[in-house]
């Protein structure tokens, strides 16, 4: 059996249940005793009425005109001593005509109440001068032709005594009931919490190497089944995140190793044989080319790392779509001529967007660079600006090799290449489209790809179109300064 500790849920549940039950039983005992007391008071009033009727037949005036109460109906003299009635008889004017020995000099009310005892019985609670509480019944009655007011009262002391006895009787078994209830509640709580303990045990066994495992889900467990499903969903997300991280680490290591190996091999070859100054320049040039690739890869990795960490802050401003397209295209003039490619621009007016110039241009540059890499000599690349309902579309269309449909949804994955060997030869690390997709997404847009193998591909940047902001915001970063970048 699990040891009892105050910090455990089962212990707190048990204590809460026992405390609630104790409060309920206490309230029940008080309520039951209170209703019993009220019932006893009603019975006492009925008894007083019956006794008053008996007293009416026993009252008479003697020869001296004094009101007397016959008590010769008792068979035994000691019977008089057990009578508990308090008796007072007054005249219609309020004069005291008779008080019995039990009442003595005490009074059941020095003044008559309005219409007291007229037309029937007048019951009420009354407190004597010495603090004794009684149930009093009054009635007007003619004794030997003279109108009198008869008051009969009985003490409530026996009622209160019985109330206390009944309340004590109800409370007497309460400790035993609470003890048994506490034991039963603790066992039930342990039983109900056992599935949660099992979930905790299973979850504790799942490590980073066993993220493929899942908790058992029993539909009959209700809320606990929902908890298991939620936990399994979290495990699925963690597994996917770990897989992406492992794949990212593996791919990054591979990509970094390739240019380093090339630099090393070129350097070793250059050291092993004598060469002319021109030869050494070629060796150094080859090494610098690989260094440039390595620098570009490291910059891309740093960009992705900063993006994942949320460390890239957008410096938004009003941007001309035509200007940003021209600025991006101008970077590839030499490369286009080298690969014998033609690039066409189809501006559609001059729509504006409100975003970060550098990030949007980087996205467009990466897409154009990807199109150039996969378009054979003599091909055509078209950069098109389109407008829609509150949207701006930037299309980059090429006449390259295209992308198979079964791989189209993976082109934005990190380190993914459609043509592994060709991309590596052209210097691509498979990060450009992934970075471009993130840059577009943080601006509230989408980057989509459509392709027909053998006929080319179309990448579309879909961004919300911006209305001109206030003048002071638009002048923060002049467009001429941006285009010079």
Image (cartoon, grey):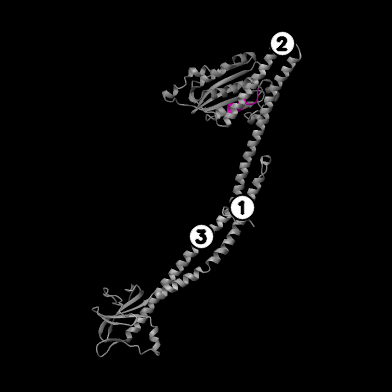
Q: Position of residue 383 (x, y in %)?
A: 57, 20
Q: Earlier in the sequence, mark 3 or mark 1?
A: 3
Q: Nearer the viewer, residue 40 or 420?
A: 40
Mark 1 or 2: in front is 2
Q: Position of residue 384 (x, y in %)?
A: 55, 21
Q: Which residues are magenta?
A: 428-437
Q: Nearer the viewer, residue 372 or 125?
A: 125
Q: Earlier in the sequence, mark 3 or mark 2?
A: 3
In this picture, residue 473 sits left or right of residue 300: left
Judged from this view, the residue extending furthest toward the left is 93
Who's the residue at 62% across and 39% down the image? 237
Task: Compute the Cα span from label 1 to label 2.
Answer: 77 Å
Please indicate, yes or no, whether residue 216 appears anywhere in the rendered image.
Answer: no
Q: Name the residue carrying label 2.
A: 279
Who's the residue at 67% across and 29% down the image? 251
Q: Magenta region, mostly helix, strand or loop?
A: helix
Question: Is the N terminus in the top left, top right, bottom left or bottom right quadrant?
Answer: bottom right
258 versus 46 height, above or below:
above
Q: Position of residue 50 (x, y in %)?
A: 37, 81
Q: Name the residue carrying label 1.
A: 221
Q: Residues within 10 Å of mark 1 (few under 14, many from 20)?
A: few
């Amino acid at each position: 059996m699990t040891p009892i500790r105050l910090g455990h849920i089962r212990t707190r549940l048990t204590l809460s249940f026992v405390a609630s039950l104790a409060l309920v039983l206490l309230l029940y005992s008080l309520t039951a005793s209170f209703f019993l007391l009220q019932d006893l008071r009603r019975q006492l009033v009925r008894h007083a009425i019956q006794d008053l009727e008996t007293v009416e037949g026993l009252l008479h005036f003697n020869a001296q005109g004094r009101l007397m109460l016959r008590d010769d109906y008792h068979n035994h003299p000691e019977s008089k001593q057990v009578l508990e009635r308090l008796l007072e008889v007054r005249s219609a004017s309020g004069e005291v005509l008779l008080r019995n020995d039990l009442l003595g000099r005490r009074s059941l009310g020095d003044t008559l109440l309005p219409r007291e005892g007229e037309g029937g019985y007048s019951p009420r609670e009354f407190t004597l001068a010495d603090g004794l509480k009684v149930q009093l019944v009054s009635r007007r009655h003619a004794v030997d032709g003279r109108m009198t007011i008869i008051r009969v009262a009985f003490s409530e002391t026996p009622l209160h005594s019985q109330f206390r006895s009944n309340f004590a009787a109800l409370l007497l078994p309460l400790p035993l009931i609470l003890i048994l209830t506490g034991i039963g509640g603790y066992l039930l709580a342990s039983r109900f919490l056992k599935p949660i303990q099992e979930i905790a045990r299973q979850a504790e066994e799942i490590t980073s190497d066993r993220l493929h495992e899942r908790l058992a889900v029993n539909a009959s467990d209700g809320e606990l089944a929902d908890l298991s499903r939620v936990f399994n969903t979290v495990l699925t997300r963690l597994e996917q995140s770990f897989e992406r991280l492992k794949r990212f680490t593996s791919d990054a290591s591979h990509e970094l190793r390739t240019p380093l190996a090339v630099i090393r091999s070129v350097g070793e070859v250059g050291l092993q044989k004598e060469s002319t100054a021109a030869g050494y320049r070629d060796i150094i040039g080859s090494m610098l080319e690989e260094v440039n690739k390595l620098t570009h890869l490291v910059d891309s990795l740093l960009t992705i790392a900063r993006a994942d960490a949320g460390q890239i802050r957008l410096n938004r401003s009003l941007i001309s779509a035509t200007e940003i397209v021209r600025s991006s295209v101008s970077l590839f003039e030499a490369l286009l001529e080298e690969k014998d490619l033609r690039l066409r621009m189809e501006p559609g007016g001059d729509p504006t967007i409100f975003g970060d110039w550098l990030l949007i241009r980087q996205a467009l540059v990466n897409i154009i660079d990807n199109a150039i890499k996969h378009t054979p000599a003599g091909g055509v690349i078209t950069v098109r600006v389109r407008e829609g309902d509150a949207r701006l579309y930037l299309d980059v269309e090429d006449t390259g090799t295209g992308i198979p449909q079964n791989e189209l949804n993976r082109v934005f994955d990190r380190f993914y290449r459609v043509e592994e060997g060709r991309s590596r030869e052209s210097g691509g690390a498979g990060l450009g489209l992934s970075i471009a997709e993130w840059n577009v997404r943080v601006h509230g847009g989408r980057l989509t790809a459509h392709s027909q193998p053998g006929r080319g591909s179309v990448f579309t940047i879909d961004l919300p179109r911006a209305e001109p902001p206030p003048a002071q915001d638009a002048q923060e970063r002049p467009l001429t300064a941006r285009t010079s970048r």
